[in-house]
Amino acid sequence: KHSRPNHHPYKSGTTPRQNPPSSQGLSTRRELYERDFPVYKQPVEVGCFSLDSERRFFNDSRQMRYYVEPDRNPNFDLRDGYKDRFIKRDDRVKEKLDHILRWILANRSKLSSRVTTASPRALDVDIVTWRGHLTKLLTSPYETREGWLLAVTRFRGTLYISEVETEAARRDRENREERHEEMMYWGYKFEQYTCADNAHSVPDPGGVVNTNEAFCTVVQTRLADHRLLFSGEVDCRDKDPNAPAPPACYIELKTSAEICTPKQRSNFHRFKLLKWWAQSFLPGVPRVVAGFRDHEGVVVTVDTFPISKMSHLIKNEHNCWKPTVCMNFCCDFLSFVKRIAAEDNPSVVYLFSWEPHRDVTYSVHRDSQYSFLPHWYVEEMTS
Ligand code: A3P
Ligand code: MG
Ligand code: MG
């Protein structure tokens, strides 16, 4: 039997503490964040939404998919259909927080209890963002390659956090090699082999893969004294009608290169599991189902990784990542943001910027290209 981890998920740690940020910015050095696991409340699903094949928003679960367990010896050709049955989302279009804001407007009554003249329809949350932005924060203390830019606006007491593409990320996107483009398709193709459209049907590997389609959960939780509302894309759910309620019935699907050597196993633990853990721990998705592929892009084995066991799996790795470092850095970053982003104004953006081996710094922008709260949202929330 496993010993009890000292960072028991979704339960309280002890006294919250904080690193004093230097006058310049906030450090991402790991040693500064090795303290007790912060309070992270069990995430609660407060709603969901769907994006259809043309990226249109629906305030419902129409794009939910159902996991169908593959045979013991799968033989999924992930390259099939790349040329002729693939519709790729246009990643030049930046949607910012728009879909989440649409969901908020459609579900305002669930979120605002303080309807007073002083603060009409203020939200009862401190932070609104995408799960993916929080994932980047969690992994920053271990990230050595990619920096990030996060735009923050305070509006009616709530902080909205929306990513801005870095110059380096734009260059990478525009100069992606054909092999890399194709490999990005593989993950979606694996989803098609393992997911059905409803609980009683089977996957259709002959269909079109359209990456515009998405099902997103919206969860509420608290990290120390930060009340969070965020949304994240969910790949599928357990099709058993007796499965636990969302998000506990959700399953994250991943593909990864087959592991053949101890070095590959170590790299998988040190780098891949960190990303997988961070992404699913945040919304309370309990497991990852991984398809391991050979060099020809054929999935040869499928394994389940419970999120709660990932930190045990990595214990033997030297100098490995720690969940508590990830969560404490995220917590301190949010405190830093609360302190800096003081002016409540929908057209002011505080731009937080980070590059590996540097501190987080920020700049302030008024009525700039960085403003991201749409007029339709500001007006509806003000009137
Ligand atoms: P894999 O992660 O299995 O390769 P997600 O796993 O988050 O549901 O994303 C589905 C797929 O989208 C990924 O499958 C991958 O193919 C692609 N993808 C997601 N994020 C990506 C990124 N930052 N760069 C490249 N591909 C990405
Ligand atoms: Mg996904
Ligand atoms: Mg996935």
Image: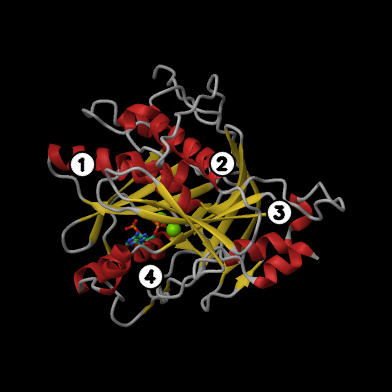
Which amino acid type is marked by label 3?
Arg
Circles 2 and 4, Cβ within 8 Å, touching? The answer is no
Q: Local crowd at mark 3 within 10 Å, few (<14), some, or many (≥20)?
A: some
Residue found 66% across the figure and 66% down from its top: 102
Q: Give left or right: position of 208 versus 40.
A: left
Q: Which numbered tag is attached to residue 267?
A: 1
Colour logic: secondary structure
Of the image marks 2 and 4, the number of the one nearer the N terminus: 4
Of the image marks 1 and 2, the number of the one nearer the N terminus: 1
Q: How many angstroms separate mark 1 from mark 2 (CA)?
A: 37 Å
Q: Which numbered tag is attached to residue 156?
A: 3
Q: Local crowd at mark 2 within 10 Å, few (<14), some, or many (≥20)?
A: few
Which amino acid type is marked by label 1?
Asn
Q: Nearer the viewer, residue 155 or 202?
A: 155
Label 1 SS: helix
Rendered-image quadrant of the N terminus: top left
Foreground mark, 2 or 3? 2
The reply to whether residue 153 is visible in this rendering is: yes
Of the image marks 2 and 3, the number of the one nearer the N terminus: 3
Which amino acid type is marked by label 4?
Pro
